Image (spheres, rainbow, N blue to C red):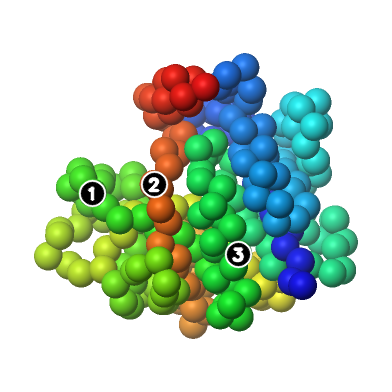
Amino acid sequence: MSKTLILIPSRMSAKRLPGKPLLKINNLPIIVHVVNRAKNTNLGRVVVCTEDQIIYDNVKKNGGEAILTDKNHKTGTDRIFDGFKKLDCKDVKYIINLQGDEPALNENDIINLNNFMIKHNSDIGTLAAEIKEDKILSDENIVKVISKEKLNYENFPTALNFTRKALSKIESNIYHHIGIYAYKAEILEKFFNLKQTQNEKENRLEQLRALDNSLNINIALAKTSPIGVDTEEEYLAIKKIMEYKS
């Protein structure tokens, strides 16, 4: 059986909403909600990778596992690779990188991505959701992915490009990218050792480093499109939704 490790990069110094991992929903920090969602998948060990002692302490206090990483990482992927090496897990085949600011991510979508990775023996996989509102296409804060084929719940096609730019509906096979990645352990190491590309820097999208170096990224269709927490408005919106549901 393939063994999966879920790693969650998290830091206090986000530019648009500093301190967001510890903002509370239903009296629990956002990062703890993400940890609990990951644990509920029963895919494997779940560890938060953070440079901040306060995040480490909050995760541990709420029953999660965390590890302190270097403070100088440029990307979340660099942070999870640091955590992976420090954990020294010898029997892990797949590593899932979950964003620490998506407390409402659907657990079944995470499971589905892991299953697709195993079934297709893929190097890198991610999730995308259908775009149901035109404002998502025009919002440059929202990452879009263009797939080689139209997505359905049975296929796992490759990504042609990722972009923040405003797009039109005329362009085909455009989806809302969800920031979760699954890697084969050896591919994560390969990715970490690649230099950042100009394309990646200009677009502020580290997944372009993979495409620029001919690494395929397969895409699974997600059943839900979760709200990420990047701004105060997004935090208040998801807090309202999650607290209402509870």
Q: Residue furthest left?
A: 170
Figure check: 130 above or below 114: above
In the depicted view, which residue is nearer to us: 65 or 161?
Answer: 65
Residue 178 in sight from this viewpoint: yes
> Where residue 132 is drawn, which disc sits there?
1
In the depicted view, which residue is nearer to us: 64 or 108?
Answer: 108
Asked if residue 244 lies left or right of residue 42, the reply is left
Please report whichever mark, 3 or 2, sits nearer to the chain's N-terminal start.
Answer: 3
**In terms of secondary structure, where does tag 1 sit?**
loop
Residue that carries the numbered disc 2 in the rendered image? 225
- The amino acid marked with disc number 2 is Ser
Name the quadrant of the N terminus: bottom right
In the depicted view, which residue is nearer to us: 52 or 57?
Answer: 57
> Where residue 72 is drawn, which disc sits there?
none
The answer for how far apart the CA atoms under marks 3 and 2 are is 18 Å
- The amino acid marked with disc number 3 is Asn
Q: Residue at x 62, y 55 (%)?
A: 97
Rendered location of residue 18, percent (x, y): 54, 28
**In terms of secondary structure, where does tag 2 sit?**
loop
The answer for how far apart the CA atoms under marks 1 and 2 are is 10 Å
In the depicted view, which residue is nearer to us: 152 or 104?
Answer: 152
User: Given contact means CB atoms under 8 Å apart, are the residues at marks 1 and 2 in contact?
Assistant: yes
Figure check: 36 above or below 181: above
Residue that carries the numbered disc 3 in the rendered image? 114
